[in-house]
Amino acid sequence: MRLFGCVCGQFHSSAAGMGMAGGEQRVAVPVPFYVIEHPDGVTLFDCGLPTSLAEPEDRLLSALRSQGLDVTFAPDETVASHLERLDIDPARVRQVVVSHLHFDHVGGLHQVPNATVVVQRAEWEAGFDEDLAARYFLRKRLFDLGHEVQLIDGEHDLFGDGRVVCIPTPGHTPGHQSVRIRSASGDHILVGDACYNGEAAETRQFPEFSDHAAMNRSLDALLALRAPDTVMVFGHDADQWGAAPVLPNARA
Ligand SMILES: [Zn+2]
């Protein structure tokens, strides 16, 4: 089983907005997603940004910019482009495990029409609850696209072989989840936005809208799962995707 990490665009924001020291200083952070080539089928963990964000007139892009968050997104960074480089037909993607329903984690769903979306029940239900969806910025038009949906409750062994295990890590959003993957390249915990970066794992600086008590509990639980050789792959950590990316992709 192989695991790849792909970067689907960059955010440009204040350091504070990304849970980093540096206040209003601008930083660029990656938007990763992951490809798991399991013998029982190709699975993604998250699926990047919606391709519409590459268009200058996009209404989501305008809304983000008005909140101080800019996006750069090259045509060869889409989910479909990454999959093609890995020689995977997007129509063949069997499942997308989504950490949560934010636009930068479900944006590419429209490019994998035959996939089943695997999501925590609490997250999916929040997406259809008017108050929670507004509080947590869950945009139905980006995730409610008619895919098959598999709702899970708590820890879930995706293939029944212990290689891909979903771990509930609520707090960033009501039903956020992370994934632990044991592959040929080692033991990885794909943290998702349970923690944006290595620095925030220390400082515990979390986004304003999130439930900080729950985030602390979830992060403590994730960190406690680490074995000596476990690599934590954070949600938006520029240090993990530079010249020496934390996971291979078709380019490296
Ligand atoms: Zn995110």
Image (tube, rainbow, N blue to C red):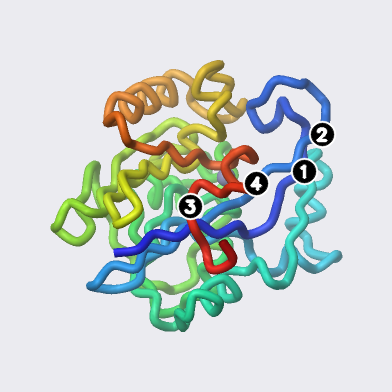
Mark positioned earlier in the residue sequence (4 or 3): 4
Is disc 1 in contact with disc 2, using a CB cutoff of under 8 Å?
A: yes
* Label 4 to label 3: alpha-carbon separation: 11 Å
Element marked by disc 4:
loop
Identify residue type, mark 2. Answer: Arg
* Label 3 to label 2: alpha-carbon separation: 26 Å
Instruction: Mark 1 and ligand 1: say if the CB distance to the nearest ligand atom is below 8 Å.
Output: no
* Label 1 to label 4: alpha-carbon separation: 15 Å
10 Å crowding of disc 4: few (<14), some (14-19), many (20+): few
Question: 62 left or right of 198?
Answer: right
* Front of the two marks 2 and 4: 4
Label 1 sits on residue: 12
Mark positioned earlier in the residue sequence (1 or 2): 1
10 Å crowding of disc 1: few (<14), some (14-19), many (20+): some
The residue at 23%/73% (across/down) is 40
* Label 1 to label 3: alpha-carbon separation: 22 Å
Instruction: Mark 3 and ligand 1: say if the CB distance to the nearest ligand atom is below 8 Å.
Output: no
Is disc 1 in contact with disc 3, using a CB cutoff of under 8 Å?
A: no
Label at residue 242? 4
Is disc 4 in contact with disc 3, using a CB cutoff of under 8 Å?
A: no
* Label 1 to label 2: alpha-carbon separation: 7 Å
Is disc 2 in contact with disc 4, using a CB cutoff of under 8 Å?
A: no
Label 2 sits on residue: 26
Label 3 sits on residue: 247
